[in-house]
Image (cartoon, coloured by chain):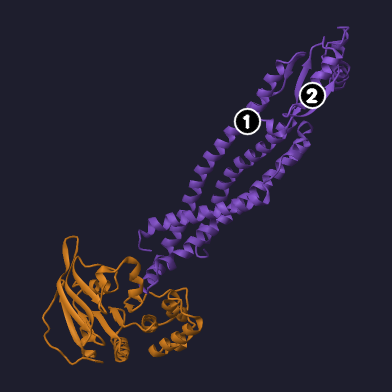
Chain colours: A purple, B orange
Amino acid sequence: MRTNRMTTIVAILTTAFTLTCVGVFLLLYVNLQHAAGWLQEDVKIMVYLEDRLSRDGRLQLELMLKSDHMVAGVLYISKEQALTEFRTQFPADSHLLEGLGENPLPASFVVTLAPSFRSPEGMKEWVEQVQTMGGVEKVDYNQQWISLLAEFIGYIELAAIGVGVLLSAAAVTIIGNTIRLTLFARREEIEILRSIGATGTFIRVPYFLEGAVLGACGSAVSLGILKVGFELFRQQVQFISRFSELKGLISFFPLSVCLGLILAGMVLGFTGSVVSLLRVGDGRV
Amino acid sequence: MDAMIQLIHVSKWYDRRPALSDVMIEIEKGEFVLLMGPSGSGKSTILRMLIGEERPDEGQLFVQGKNVTKLKRSEIPYLRRKVGSVFQDFRLLPKKSVFDNVALPLIVQGVSEKDIRRKVTEALRAVGVEHKRDLSPSSLSTGEQQRVCIARAIVNGPVILLADEPTGNLDSELTGEIIELFKLINARGTTVVVATHNHHVRHQVNCRVISLMQGVVLPERAMPERVGV
């Protein structure tokens, strides 16, 4: 590696930039997955009640909901509470309701489903079932939004896989070419080693190791670039007040994933040198 | 006498041109043989075949009773460990010291450091360049570089020593010194085969001469008494 210092540095940097592109997608995917999980946990189903539902009818319905094994929590919001909340959340628009005289907002139950039933399919099934119950005016939840998010994450996952495969192949080629250059520079040395009885393994192993080290270094540098970029992004997010909550939500790769990425870089580098030795050596090295 | 090297009806073609034609050679254990002939006569082809670098297109080739033509690729390094090679261009690694260059065949065989030190010192002493052990090959004279190359070839005690035009880069005085060295190595029991086109060499050593011309072995004109047997 010392003999071709410049080639080695260029190979590490090129591999690092290539793996950084993969890392950006991976980071986006990991954070969206995290956000989707967090949003799914926070999903509430609004069960709006008919205005004519009696107090007994409402209590009976509440009991039925609470005894449902799919339900984790039920919170009753009366018409008055709904009005107060509206006024708190939308103070500028509260005058809109004043002209109507009677409170137009319905009473409702805010239902949280048990974690195992929070999938879009689970929620849809439960909602369809509740909608048929007596006294229920309407059931509302952000199903479309959740489905869209799931779909979007699916696309990101596909893109991450596609870009990952493509750029991993590029990394293998880059490292392979570096090893080929090294082999070319050392062809006389290899020839001498062969003539004195060195086995193919004895000659190849240092190049395999060199490829693996190149890959690991490239991967480590790419993680450094990603970390710096990530911290800069997080700082920017902090300054924009409407996204400031995002700061706590987004996170960098955990240590295990970082180590996994370095290992992946090693495997890519090793593969690159194997491919290069098979092609250049043509079975002779 | 045991045959150390046998070429039986060996032929080789390069681009349909014959490099060797029906060559029959037998070299006995401990023998000193000169392979003589002009450039392109097939001397180097025979040496390359003996270390498994080339395969004959026809015929059989035996080294110490082992059929080299049937060796697997993975077995060839082990053949080369029994056959030391000396080259006209020395083939020394310029970035390594004399000691490290000579140690290479032992390193590839996984010999312990202690044994490497002992064997390399013995080999360098045998060729008379022990005092140059820490120098770079490029700082040595051509004669000294060839001595280092010979030390590397004999350091692991090969049964055969092959030399391809070993005196090609040397003047007549140094040629004499190198041939004397080969005689000494041969006297210790190593079979020595020297390929050369230098007719002065044949006057410096009293041994069997195999003459080649356009890939054909010429009939032996004389059988001088052998050295070292």
Residue at which label 2 appears: A110
A69 vs B42: above or below: above
Q: Which residue is mark 1?
A: A150
Sequence order check, earlier mark of 2 and 1: 2
Chain for numbered disc 2? A
Q: Is residue A275 left or right of residue A67?
A: left
Same-chain status of marks 2 and 1: yes
Q: Please tell me which residue is depicted at 40% across the width and 83% down the height of the picture.
A: B155
Q: Quadrant of residue A199?
A: bottom left
> Split into 4 quadrants, where in the image is the C terminus of chain A?
bottom left
Asked if residue A18 shows in the view, the reply is yes
Query: Quarter-wise, where is residue A185 in the image?
Result: bottom left
At which x and y percent is residue A221?
A: 61, 53
Depth order, front residue of B72/B5: B72
Query: In this rendering, would B54 be left or right of A108?
Result: left
* Element on which disc 1 rests: helix
Could you tell me which chain the residue with mark 1 belongs to? A
Q: Is residue B168 above or below residue B179?
A: above
